[in-house]
Image (cartoon, helix red, strand yellow):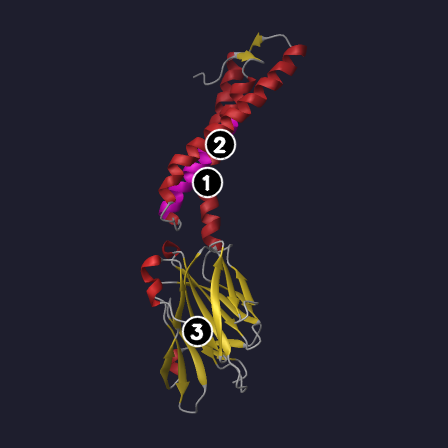
Amino acid sequence: MKIFPDKYPYNIPYVLAGFIGGFGAIFGLTALIAEEHIGRPSSTHAIGFIFVPIYAALLALACFCVGLVVRGIVGIFVKPRPISQQTNKMITIFFLCVLAVAFFSGVAFIQQQEVKQQPHLIFDSGNIIKISPSEIRGKKEKDATFVLTIYSDDKNQVAPFLWNGKKIDFKVLGDNTLKILDPGGHELIVADLHKFDYIGRIHALQIALSDSESKGLAVLVRLRATSRHSMLLIYDSSAKLIYQELLERHADNEMNTIVDDSGIEYLYVDIDSPVVYSNALK
């Protein structure tokens, strides 16, 4: 079976375009298909099946143009000659191997991305511990406030939020960077979440982290709906990050405060499974 012309150096542009363009096409399409089965495809995922072939074709065209230049240079020193049937067969086999590598690389890429996106603790200053809800005897007192959404159909549900008596504003920059501003518009908090996904909705809740009257801030960020992830961020009263965790989301965001019989306040989060967060010094 002959895939490329069997005359050298006439075949150089075709070999470059075929190998590199073919690798790009197979890798991209395989990654798209693998993401449907083992990944977390976005709502615009299907568009990739249009753009990947276009990008691969442009890549192949660029390689073909480079190959023309290379062929011209090589042609100065080498006279055109046919290559042997055995050599042509080896080139074909090598080309098919490259396509196979592209296929397995596309699958491996999505698998690696999925491993990176597994729920995990991102940062812990040592001030927060997780407790089973069964260990706490108390009642829920306050629900988190819905403070931001990127979806127009539920923006009317967003409410203002006070943190230690001052109104703060929540903004999203570039789809994946959260900014929290004080009444003067100055940045109190910046959380860059571009490694995880884009921001969909945000809930916030004041939480007592110490004996001080000033309270900390718990922020629950619902990431892209089809990602099935939420991000929990906990800040102390000085707006310093003390805890960050990526959570697997199996239900709607639920975040509350729980106060036990002795008046101690805890943070209750039910996203994957119910968990209580507490100050380690309590």
x, y percentage for residue 114? 45, 52
Q: Which residue is under mark 1?
A: 106
How far is mark 1 from mark 2, CA to CA? 10 Å
* Viewer-nearest residue: 251 or 163: 163
Q: What kind of residue is marked 3?
A: Phe
Start-end of magenta stretch: 19-37
Residue 270 drawn at (x, y percent): 37, 71
The residue sitting at 36% across, 58% down in the picture is 151
Which residue in the structure is indicated by mark 2? 23
Farthest residue in the front direction? 184
**Marks 1/3: CA–CA distance:** 44 Å
Seen from the viewer's position, the closer of residues 215 and 154 is 154
Whether the residues at callouts 1 and 2 have beta carbons within 8 Å, the answer is no
Does any portion of residue 251 appear in the rendered image? no
Kindly identify which residue carries mark 3. 161
Give the structural element (helix, strand or loop) at label 1: helix
Percent x, y of residue 271: 37, 67
Give the foreground label among 1 and 3.
3
The spot of residue 159 in percent (x, y) is 38, 71
Amino acid type, callout 1: Gly
Instruction: Say whether disc 2 or disc 3 marks the residue closer to the N-terminus.
Output: 2
